[in-house]
Structure formats: structure tokens, C-alpha cells
Amino acid sequence: MNTGLELQDVSLSVGSRQLLSLSCTIAPGEVMTVMGASGTGKSTLLAFIAGFLNEAFTAEGRIVLENKALNSVPAEQRRIGLLFQDALLFPHLSVAENLKFGLVRTAGESRKDRDDRVEQALEAISLGGFGDRDPASLSGGQQSRIALMRLLLSEPQAILLDEPFSNLDMQLRGEIRAFTFDSIRAANIPALLVTHDLADAQAAGGKILAL
């Protein structure tokens, strides 16, 4: 049974100063939000969960994903996807090649099978036929959709969202925000959003924790 993402008695500190202390469970398909001003430990919390906490910080507590404790698991084996403010598409790869980078391959799958899966993924985000495009030729919203689809194709068991909409203009922000949250719910993946924007938190529709 998928129990989602659990943070059990998590405490983060820098030197003698405690940044945050929390316990919570994020159900599959839920987007929980952690809000707070800069310096309150939001991004540090994501780094701890993802497995690349800076040595300047100390952490206590357990991270449990689908009933498996992750604290001692290397970052690359945690199956946690991240979305940042920037899409971070590989500039030397085409749109299709960016998606193939995230694609989890199945046994016996041919190159044509992978190409077909990538084209289906592009169709799903209304970018069919864009596979040969240079990522730099895409709009900000198109880049955001490609970044999200690349993440979903990697089949993560949880998703961390670090202010992913802050670089978008207001109209596009609402559109991409809705698309992102709808996609996470459809994939039934637990997600944690950090933001300072109340509109983002309200649109996520899950629990809100203010630091």
C-alpha cells in the first residue's frame, strides 16, 4: 500500500539556531505547502528530503517514503523528483532528447517504442510535433511543461517543488500551476511545495504549514 511521504519528528538547524521542526504525512496525490519568508528553512527542508543537505546544516528525524526509510539512501536512489524556479532543460539536447533523459526504459523496448512514448508525452502536454525543437526556442510556459513531463517520465515516488512558478508572469503562472497540480494528482504522487505566495498554496489544495 502506498502510504505517501512521511516526515517524522524532522528538525533542521544551522549552528545553534533551529530553523524548523515538523511532523507530517503527505498522501499520494496530495500537494502539501510549506510557506515562509527567506531564511526560514524551506529550501533546506527540500534538500534534506532529497538527500543533498549542505554540511553547514544539521538534521534530525526520519524521512519515510512508501514505508521505506530514506535517511541512509543515496540521493540518486531515493526516486524523488524536483522542480525548481527554472526549467533547467539541457540546452545541448532537443526537446525529445530532454524527455528521453528522464524516460524509464522497460525490458525489450525498442528505440521506436521510446520515440513513440516521447511523442505521446508531448501530445499529452499539447506540444505534439515539438520533439526536434531547441529548448531555447520554447516559451517559458512550454519549457515548464517539458520540465514537468520529463520529471513524470522518470516515475518518481514523490515530488518536491521549490518555487516552480515564481519566474512566470501572472497569467501564465495560473495556467502552469493548475497543469502541474492536476498532473501530480492524476499520477497519484505525494508532493511538497515550498513558496512564499499564498495563491500558490491555495491552488495546491492540500495542507498548508506556515513557518
Image: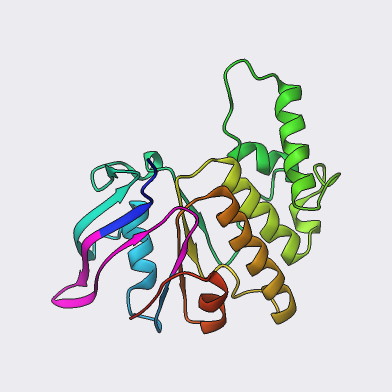
Look at the image and name its color scheme: rainbow
Residue reaching furthest to the right: 129
Quarter assignment of residue 110? top right
On-image quarter of the C terminus: bottom left
Main SS of the magenta segment?
strand
30 in magenta: yes
Horizontally, residue 182 falls left or right of residue 77, namely right
Could you say where residue 119 lies in the image, as x and y percent from the top left? 78, 38
Q: Nearer the viewer, residue 116 or 30?
A: 30
Looking at the image, residue 169 lies above or below residue 113 = below
Which residue lies at the image location 67% right of the left edge and 74% below the top edge? 173
On-image quarter of the N terminus: top left
Which residue lies at the image location 47% right of the left edge and 60% below the top edge? 30
Horizontally, residue 136 falls left or right of residue 206, namely right
Horizontally, residue 28 falls left or right of residue 7, namely right
Residue 34 in view in this figure: yes
Residue reaching furthest to the left: 16
Could you say where residue 39 lies in the image, as x and y percent from the top left? 35, 80
Residue reaching furthest to the top: 108
Looking at the image, residue 171 lies above or below residue 133 = below
- Magenta residue span: 8-32
Residue 89 in view in this figure: no
Could you say where residue 207 lies in the image, as x and y percent from the top left? 42, 72
Which residue lies at the image location 63% right of the left edge and 54% below the top edge? 147
Quarter assignment of residue 144? bottom right
Which residue lies at the image location 81% right of the left edge and 51% below the top edge? 127
11 in magenta: yes
Q: How many marks?
A: 0
